[in-house]
Image: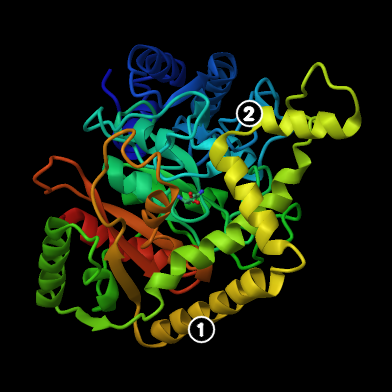
């Protein structure tokens, strides 16, 4: 059996009884065991995956199977799956077991997807290289001396390596799209509120979204169709009905696309990436699309605004890990206060502590107006500008990242440098819009990079349709 690059390929074999789901699960479990040198999988869920597979084989033979029957999906280690370990790649949650399943996991399982295991990530999804993990860094599948990107580095690598058909990641500032770009796969961050966050370990709740990482657009569309929708357990989830994303028709219309000049003039942007995306722009124009430069004068404020707001939310969200309620507790403490302090000091890694402290600082009485309130106002200005752009244009096009994957260990020591990695991705989280990273593969280093498309809120259908058109011509 060979690894499947699309669910469609596998589905036809399952439905024609050429393969059973149990055979497929056994194949993937073995493949993961023998090919985990990139450190993407933390754990496989052998028993439950095989139980699911047996059930799905019966459903297939009875012809009452779901839309995802047999799809091998792995989940980032910050998404709850009942009775399965979950750690957010942090010592503070080591040995913790989920008491319930995230809504997305329930929805996937109800449609017959098989949850094969959990994937390495940056601790509490904080990072851009997957080096902030108690399990060690994830290695880039194309060049093992480079990072996989973060924070969903395990998800992108596992999909690129063919260790699963698709993976779920979470994206607070780019964590689905940036690793997808570094690993040469498709990464979709849906509109904020499109997908329930119930059962996702919260980092920054007004930014976090769960989304798919896949080898192709059709798989991303199908997964989104299953996981999207209103959920009474997430008060921010949207009540809009979910379109049939999976029935993507060929793009017939000519689109208007804006590209942000400031991104392309950015001094940190790799020249080959710049030139290659310009070549792409030329070919889009040739096909009759309207592609124009626009000015987005706030580019240099994005990362700072994101870090003030996301760390503020993180400092509040992570206060629940106190050594008392759940997770790790220091053993030899003398009183309650010391238990809190020592458990958190030992349980959290450096990057997480840095962000909790920064977030606490920007929310503190003397600095609230100067940082937190100001950043909120800037977020509003950014949102207004994006709304105005989408009055005229269908899509905003940028590179996903300024350059290809960097060497493991290179930027780890300099947090500011690392934060600037997210310069092109945080925009969609600040404004809430959907955004996708499409793989481009013609860089002289041999490493892939990403072309990012952003669209109006809740227009994933047209974003995916257009992406499919572009993806097939890359
Ligand atoms: N790399 C960004 C950060 O470190 C984004 C993280 C994410 O999207 N979870 O905050």
Tag 2, which secondary structure?
loop
Position of residue 57 measured from the top left corner of the image (x, y, whole percent): 50, 22
Q: Which residue is mark 2?
A: 86
Q: Residue at x 52, y 54 (%)?
A: 172
Taking 35 as reference, is 274 above or below it? below
Of residue 100 and residue 85, the one placed in the foreground of this image is: 85
Ligand 1 is within 8 Å of the C-beta of the residue at disc 1: no
Q: Which mark is residue 84?
A: none
Q: Residue at x 49, y 59 (%)?
A: 190
Task: Answer whether residue 367 is visible to the viewer in this image.
Answer: yes
Q: Residue furthest right?
A: 335
Q: Of marks 2 and 1, which one's residue comes earlier in the chain? A: 2
Q: Residue at x 56, y 30 (%)?
A: 89
Position of residue 286 measured from the top left corner of the image (x, y, whole percent): 9, 75
Taking 153 as reference, is 173 above or below it? below
Disc 2 from disc 1: Cα separation:
38 Å
Tag 1, which secondary structure?
helix
Taking 96 as reference, is 260 above or below it? below
Task: Answer whether residue 259 is visible to the viewer in this image.
Answer: no
User: Count the marks: how many?
Assistant: 2
The quarter of the displayed image where residue 291 is located: bottom left
Q: Which residue is mark 1?
A: 384
Is residue 91 rendered to the left or right of residue 175? right
Position of residue 352 measured from the top left corner of the image (x, y, whole percent): 59, 41
Ligand 1 is within 8 Å of the C-beta of the residue at disc 2: no
Q: Residue at x 48, y 30 (%)?
A: 120
Position of residue 8 measured from the top left corner of the image (x, y, whole percent): 33, 39
Of residue 148 and residue 14, the one placed in the foreground of this image is: 148
């Amino acid at each position: 059996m060979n690894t499947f690059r699309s669910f469609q390929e596998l589905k036809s074999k399952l439905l024609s009884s050429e393969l059973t789901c149990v055979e497929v699960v056994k194949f993937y479990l073995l493949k993961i065991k023998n090919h985990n040198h990139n450190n993407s999988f933390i754990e496989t869920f052998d028993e439950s995956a095989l139980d699911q597979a047996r059930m799905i084989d019966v459903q297939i033979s009875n012809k009452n199977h779901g839309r995802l029957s047999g799809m091998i999906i792995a989940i980032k280690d910050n998404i709850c799956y009942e009775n399965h370990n979950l750690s957010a790649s942090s010592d503070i949650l080591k040995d913790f077991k989920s008491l319930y399943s995230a809504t997305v996991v329930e929805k996937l399982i109800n449609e017959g997807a098989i949850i094969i295991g959990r994937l390495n990530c940056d601790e509490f999804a904080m990072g851009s290289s997957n080096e902030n993990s108690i399990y060690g860094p994830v290695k880039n599948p194309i060049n093992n001396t480079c990072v996989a990107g973060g924070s969903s580095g395990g998800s992108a690598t596992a999909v690129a390596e063919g260790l699963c058909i698709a993976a779920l990641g979470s994206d607070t500032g780019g964590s689905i799209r940036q690793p997808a770009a570094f690993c040469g796969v498709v990464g979709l961050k849906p509109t904020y509120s499109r997908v329930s966050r119930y059962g996702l370990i919260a980092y920054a709740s007004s930014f976090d979204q769960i989304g798919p990482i896949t080898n192709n657009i059709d798989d991303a569309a199908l997964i989104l169709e299953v996981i999207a929708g209103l959920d009474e357990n997430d008060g921010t989830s949207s009540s809009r009905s979910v379109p049939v994303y999976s029935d993507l028709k060929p793009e017939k219309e000519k689109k208007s696309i804006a590209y942000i000049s400031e991104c392309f003039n950015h001094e940190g942007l790799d020249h080959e990436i710049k030139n290659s995306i310009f070549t792409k722009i030329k070919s889009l124009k040739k096909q009759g699309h309207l592609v124009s430069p626009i000015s987005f004068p706030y580019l240099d404020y994005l990362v700072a605004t994101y870090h003030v707001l996301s760390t503020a939310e993180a400092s509040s969200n992570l206060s629940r890990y106190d050594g008392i309620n759940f997770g790790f507790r220091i053993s030899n403490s003398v009183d309650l206060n010391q238990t809190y302090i020592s458990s958190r000091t030992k349980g959290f890694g450096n990057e997480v502590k840095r962000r909790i402290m920064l977030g606490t600082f920007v929310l503190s009485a003397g600095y609230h107006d100067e940082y937190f309130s100001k950043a909120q106002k800037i977020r509003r200005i950014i949102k207004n500008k994006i709304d105005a752009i989408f009055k005229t244009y269908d899509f905003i096009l940028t590179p996903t990242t300024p350059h290809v994957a960097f060497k493991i260990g290179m930027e780890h020591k300099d947090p500011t440098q690392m934060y600037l990695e997210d310069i092109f991705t945080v925009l969609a989280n600040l404004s809430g819009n959907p955004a996708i990273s499409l793989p481009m593969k013609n860089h002289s280093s041999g490493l892939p990079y990403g072309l990012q498309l952003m669209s109006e809120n809740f227009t994933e259908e047209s974003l995916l349709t257009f992406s499919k058109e572009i993806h097939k011509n890359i």
